[in-house]
Amino acid sequence: MTRYIFITGGVVSSLGKGLGSAALGALLQARGYKVRLCKLDPYLNVDPGTMSPFQHGEVYVTDDGAETDLDLGHYERFTGVPAKAMDNTTTGRIYTSVLQRERRGDYLGATIQVIPHITNEIQDFIREKDGSADFVLCEVGGTVGDIESLPFLEAIRQFGNEVGQERSLFLHVTLLPYIPAAGELKTKPTQHSVKELMSYGIRPKILLCRADREIAKEELSKIALFCNLEDNKVIPALDVSSIYEVPLTYHAEGLDTAVMDYFGIDDVENLDLSIWEDIVKRVKEPESTVRIGIVGKYTNLADSYKSLNESLIHGGIANNAKVELKFIEAEDLETGDPVDYLKDVHGVLVPGGFGDRGSEGKIKAVQFARERKIPYFGICFGMQMAVIETARNLCGIKGASSTEFGPCETPIVAMISEWVKDGKIEMRDENTDKGGTMRLGAYPAILTPGSKVAEAYGAEEISERHRHRYEVDMDFKEQLEAQGMKISGVSPDGQLPEIVEIEDHPWFIAVQFHPELKSKPFDPHPLFVSYIKAALEQSRLV
Ligand code: GLN
């Protein structure tokens, strides 16, 4: 029997609903339950793929090639359950599907309306998960009261009625703001938010109260009284210094116990959370510190590189090291001297990116790391820039560039118009829609035996997630390899370069895919483990 937990948010956005859902998923897993997490996003975009990372943060890519909300990254990082395309939907997607069916004539005779057609489509999305797990945790994006979330709230209300209280739970995340002048945490916004939710017919049975300081017992009781809840169902959720503490702190406050209690499930005596205890211990008591310089474009919104930041931390966890991230605006390197920005880092990393702006700065960063033998990790765009750098500065191909930046003399990185996916040929040209048409999702790669990358993975066949439109041209293989840049990973048909590495360098690996999407704190990605190890060695040299 699948039980459903619907997670809504009130008062303000950015409450950490996604993280809370992921942590609850991990706590249920620790009891031996199979969990699945999904997210309903109220925005109109069909997927977040074309949204600016400045606005929306990172786009998380699933194995099956969907561009999804970054919360799916939290879910996968905390539970290890690979996210799927069907774990995320948006208003845009729901409407697209209903309207396509209307055009096809599936509803002939009917007037198409938000209720029941849109709400039914949302419920179908939720129902699709039935039987796939013991607990389905379904997060509703946005804040209760937003116009856009109304159909979603109506849909989960109806769904809750259909499956009954024994199989559905509404959990509401709210905020208790601290008012310095009064010296108090305020409960009124929470009361109003619950009232608003009740006006849609949804009665939350557990409240997760976010606050930046301890919430007095009387305040918690007051919330329980005013919001019509049992005392043990109002859970304080205080800020913590590492996100990996969240499962432990929520457990200590009784969140998961409250869920078990609500469903009337006998709870285990002593829950084994040693995995999380070990992770937190390693995060909080590192033996050493390394500093990684990330040369990118979206450096002033922390969420733009969410998975990357976490993967670097995971690499640190594996090496008992604290990883300090130094974000460097690529454009600053274009005019300035890279030494000024990179002299104090033990590793340089150029992450995924799009467009011309800052690209010359990234190329300068690659050159700095290559020449000074500082560990270099290039991810997607960071691989393309590394190849351009070698082509220009070692192979002497001065006009080497990417067609992403417009026509160029030597397009060493160019748009791929044809490639093989699951045995079938996929095609695209300049006029193809921008949304959802990149080379997306998991693709296998074959590694060169004895290469550094094969050594890091401890394997010669891997599968990693992709999200790119351009590709290094294999025709330049010989010229690059003659200068020491080896293509050490390729697609199974040998057509597409997946990995390059420089032999005569302590650690210079650049990959066309996004390894950061698969790293977990309890299972750090081998490339990040190996890179942080190299950075640690570098830190001992200086
Ligand atoms: N802009 C590059 C491409 O489309 C790289 C994409 C990325 O880094 N994710 O190929």
Image (tube, rainbow, N blue to C red):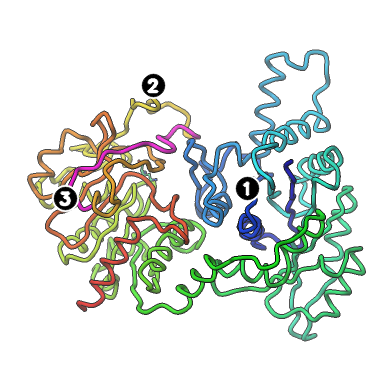
Residue 64 appears left or right of 107: left
Q: Which secondary structure lies at badge 1?
A: loop
Quarter of the image that includes the N terminus: top right
Mark 1 to mark 2: distance in Å?
Answer: 33 Å
Give x and y (percent) for residue 232.
82, 68
In the image, residue 154 lies in the stretch drawn in magenta: no
Q: Residues within 10 Å of mark 2 (few under 14, many from 20)?
A: few
Residue lying at 30% horizontally and 61% vertically, measured from the top left: 531
Q: Residue furthest front?
A: 269
Bounds of the magenta span? Answer: 435-452
Total of numbered circles in the picture?
3
Residue lying at 26% horizontally and 43% vertically, measured from the top left: 460
Instruction: Look at mark 2 in the image and give the residue it sits on.
Output: 424
Q: Is residue 427 visible?
A: no
Q: Nearer the viewer, mark 1 or mark 3?
A: 1
Q: Residues within 10 Å of mark 3 (few under 14, many from 20)?
A: many
The relative height of residue 296 versus residue 431 in the rendered view (above or below) is: below
The relative height of residue 86 versus residue 377 in the rendered view (above or below) is: above
Residue 405 appears left or right of 83: left
Q: Is residue 5 visible?
A: yes
- What's the amino acid at mark 3? Thr
- What's the amino acid at mark 1? Lys
Residue in the foreground of this view, choosing between 542 and 166: 166
Instruction: Look at mark 3 in the image and give the residue it sits on.
Output: 390
Instruction: Look at mark 1 in the image and give the residue it sits on.
Output: 34
First in residue order: circle 1 vs circle 2:
1
Give x and y (percent) for residue 277.
54, 71
- What's the amino acid at mark 2? Lys
Q: Which secondary structure lies at badge 3?
A: helix
First in residue order: circle 1 vs circle 3:
1
